[in-house]
Image (cartoon, rainbow, N blue to C red):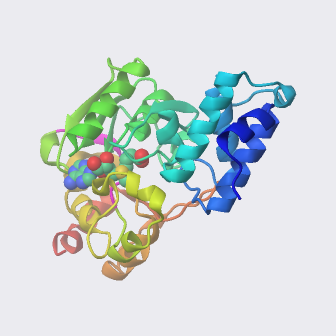
């Protein structure tokens, strides 16, 4: 028999109690973790610390602190919503972390989690020889990739492009939140169509790339994210093919293109066996991110325009 809310709220007292109870609830309910944490315990820690307005790096001495009655109710409510609605934790909290920066997120945008974060933090070394002056974050969603680039490259001008007006509204809020409006703009664009005549030293993209098979197997948590941010046709390459066809027109001579396509990398290799994609490695996990230079894109443009 399940304990009633009343029993739980009276028996559980400390921060430790609520984290433990939340983690147990999450494990028992078979939740999926892939939106910022990869296990039940870390998800529970995030929810409890957030509700108590405690910083994520709080000292372990807070574990024994007692919650007030209203704090207990608030924590209980969020833990129940995580279980009942299968809502990913960042949507419950209203924000997510990426490259050490906090981004507003809601169900209009994908929750930031791209392994490209590691490349940004490393300043895209050794692939870029100097700081890029103009950067494009294509398929920007919340704007996390482009805004993190603006943070790492303090002199760069950055365009955040997306086809979704909803996503662009969130990106604009994040531009304002990070006070980067003087160097970063949100642009409505169907792939490159809204960017005519612009040239970039760096184009970074985490486009929709989930193939039809993976779309049909997605855990419930992913159904809260916009389908437009995930689905990309039978082989997941609908947008990636278009990027490859057109990117060279939008890159400077020394420019570089970086694209994430996760599991769909196998379809790309099958489609273009002769293209020398540089597949990037990640220390913190992630796969299916390639890099091509403007020169490589130009050299192989016939192969890309044939598809
Ligand atoms: C996988 S999400 C990536 C969001 C963000 N870059 C990130 O890493 O969290 C893909 C984004 O591409 C956008 N998108 C889908 N089709 C597009 C298109 N044809 N042109 C531009 N953006 C598109 C979606 O609206 C969504 O915001």
Residue 170: x percent and y percent? 33, 33
What residue is drawn where x is 74% and y is 40%? 7
83 versus 288 height, above or below:
above
175 versus 196 height, above or below:
above
54 versus 237 height, above or below:
above
Does residue 169 appear anywhere in the picture?
yes
Q: Quadrant of residue 31?
A: bottom right
The part of the chain drawn in magenta is 198-208
Q: Quadrant of residue 27?
A: bottom right
Residue 38: x percent and y percent? 64, 55
What residue is drawn where x is 61% and y is 43%? 79
For residue 197, side relative to residue 205 (left or right)? left
Is residue 101 within the magenta segment? no
Does residue 41 appear anywhere in the picture?
no
For residue 73, side relative to residue 94 (left or right)? right
Give the quarter of the figure containing the N terminus: bottom right
Give the quarter of the figure containing the C terminus: bottom left
What residue is drawn where x is 74% and y is 46%? 21
Task: Report the front residue among 63 and 122.
Answer: 63
What residue is drawn where x is 68% and y is 45%? 4
Residue 209: x percent and y percent? 35, 63
Task: Report the front residue among 252 and 97.
Answer: 97
Task: Report the front residue among 216 and 140.
Answer: 216
For residue 6, side relative to residue 113 (left or right)? right
For residue 223, side relative to residue 113 (left or right)? left
């Amino acid at each position: 028999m399940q304990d009633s809310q009343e029993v739980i709220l009276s028996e559980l007292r400390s921060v430790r109690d609520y984290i433990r109870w939340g983690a147990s609830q999450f494990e028992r309910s078979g939740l999926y973790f892939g939106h910022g944490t990869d296990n039940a315990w870390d998800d529970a820690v995030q929810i409890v610390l957030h509700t108590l307005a405690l910083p994520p790096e709080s000292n372990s001495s807070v574990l024994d602190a007692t919650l007030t009655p209203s704090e207990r109710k608030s924590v209980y409510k969020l833990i129940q919503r995580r279980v009942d609605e299968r809502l990913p934790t960042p949507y419950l909290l209203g924000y997510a972390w990426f490259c050490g920066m906090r981004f507003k997120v809601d169900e209009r945008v994908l929750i930031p989690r791209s392994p490209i974060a590691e490349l940004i933090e490393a300043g895209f070394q050794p692939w870029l020889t100097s700081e890029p002056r103009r950067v494009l974050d294509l398929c920007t969603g919340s704007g996390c990739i482009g805004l993190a680039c603006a943070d790492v490259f303090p002199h760069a001008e950055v365009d955040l492009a997306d086809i979704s007006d909803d996503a662009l509204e969130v990106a604009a809020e994040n531009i304002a939140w990070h006070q980067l409006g003087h160097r970063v703009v949100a642009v409505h664009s169907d792939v490159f169509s809204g960017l005519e005549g612009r040239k970039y030293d760096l184009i970074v993209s985490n486009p929709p790339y989930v193939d039809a098979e993976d779309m049909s197997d997605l855990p419930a948590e992913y159904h809260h994210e916009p389908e437009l941010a995930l689905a990309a046709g039978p082989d997941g390459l609908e947008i990636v093919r278009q990027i490859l066809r057109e990117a060279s027109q939008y890159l400077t001579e020394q420019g570089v293109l970086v694209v994430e396509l996760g599991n769909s990398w196998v379809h790309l290799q099958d489609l273009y066996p002769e293209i020398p994609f540089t597949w990037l490695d990640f220390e913190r996990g992630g796969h299916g991110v390639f890099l091509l230079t403007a020169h490589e894109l130009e050299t192989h443009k016939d192969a890309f325009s044939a598809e």
